[in-house]
Image: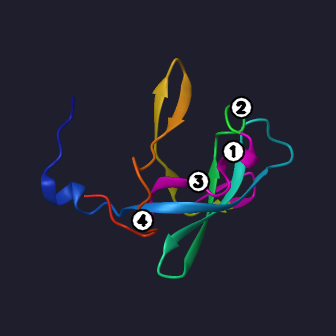
Amino acid sequence: MTTVKLDVFKQLDIRVARVISAERIKRSDKLLLLKVDIGGGEVRQIVAGLAPHYSPEQLVGREVIVLVNLEPKTLMGYISQGMLLAAVEDDKPVLIVPESEVKVGAKIT
């Protein structure tokens, strides 16, 4: 396992976010297009490979954990401005979510 120094970890901007919309991306069996509120009035677009495991309806309104300072990447013609964090269990993603309701935009430290 590779280790990282604490100051490297502190460079990651990980926040509680709320999914405000989700839709399937046409021409893709795996990708969903999400809009997430990351706090401070900022909404980000994220492309996530969750479609085989989560319907759009299961995600809208949920609090999730998002890495917001990841370099943007274009997938299927859509710009993804972050990454939802998930664990993998039996080759399926399991979203990491707060144990109780937390203010949108709260930083994960």
Residue at the limit of the structure toward the right, as seen here: 26
As helix, strand or loop, the secondary structure at mark 2 comes to loop
CB atoms of marks 3 and 1 within 8 Å: yes
Residue underneath mark 1? 58
State left or right for residue 5 relative to residue 56. Answer: left
Given the current orientation, which residue lies at the most extreme front position? 100
Q: Which mark is residue 52?
A: 2
Q: In this figure, which residue is indicated by the disc labeled 3?
A: 62
Q: The disc labelled 1 sits on which kind of residue?
A: Gln
Marks 2 and 4 sit apart, C-alpha to C-alpha, by 26 Å
Q: Which mark is in front, 2 or 1?
A: 1
- The structure residue drawn at horizontal position 42% and vertical position 65%, both measured from the top left corner, is 69
Task: Name the residue nearer the viewer: 30 or 55.
Answer: 55
What range is drawn magenta here? 55-78
Disc on the earlier residue, 2 or 4: 2
Q: Earlier in the sequence, mark 2 or mark 3?
A: 2
Q: Is residue 98 above or below residue 40?
A: above
On whether residue 60 falls in the magenta region, the answer is: yes
